[in-house]
Image (spheres, grey):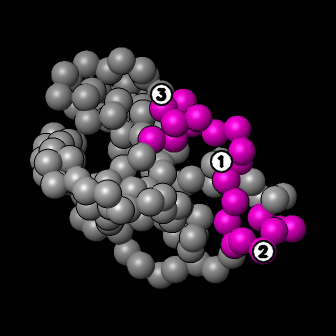
Amino acid sequence: METTESEPAPELPAEEEMALIRDITAASEAHAKEGDIFFLITNRWWQSWIDYVIQDLAGVPSNGSHHHEFGSNTPRRPGAIDNTNLLDEMASEVSDMQIELHDTLVEGRDYILLPQQVWEKLHGWYVSFVQNANLIPRI
């Protein structure tokens, strides 16, 4: 796969990220209509982001794995969005389609759906350097 040279957006405090995502989600839901585009995001990454923004608000870690080493109480920001665990690489290699999802995925367990505006904001903050590894739209 090719790599891109794009730079991630500057980091915002976790509480600002959460507020922006909450507001964008509410606006998207209020104006939702048939035909809107949604993006899949791996539940594993989404939960690490939720832990990050909630831990930061509470000031108390709920899972030490999301914190920096040496006992720091500063929550660790999630890494780049990586949806590759949703892809069936074997099926994609033999299929005419460029990308195929595993056929056993369950919404809420393996992935969640994000409105396009939410995806674009998160992708801007947590850009992946592997082209197409994280772009999984769903209509």
Q: Amino acid at mark 3?
A: Ser
Q: Quadrant of residue 125?
A: bottom left
The three-letter code of the residue at mark 2 reads: Asp
Answer with mark 1 or mark 2, whichever residue precedes in sequence.
1
| Disc 1: which residue | 85
**The one of 20 and 137 positioned closer to us in this rendering:** 137
Counting from the top left corner in percent of width and height, residue 63 is at: 42, 20
Residue 103 horizontal side relative to residue 35, left or right: right
Which of disc 3 and disc 2 is earlier in sequence? 3
Residue receiving disc 2: 96
Which of marks 3 and 1 precedes in the sequence? 3
Task: Write down the residue under mark 3.
Answer: 65
Q: Quadrant of residue 76?
A: top left
Number of the label disc, if any, that sits on residue 23? none
- The residue at 44%/60% (across/down) is 139
| Residue kind at label 1, given as amino acid type | Asn
Mark 2 to mark 3: distance in Å? 40 Å
SS category of the residue bearing label 1? helix
- Report the span colored magenta: 92-112
Q: Which is more foreground, mark 1 or mark 3?
A: 1
Whether residues under marks 1 and 3 lie with C-beta atoms below 8 angstroms apart, the answer is no
x and y, in percent, of residue 58 in the image: 19, 22
| Whole-percent x, y for residue 96 in the image | 78, 74
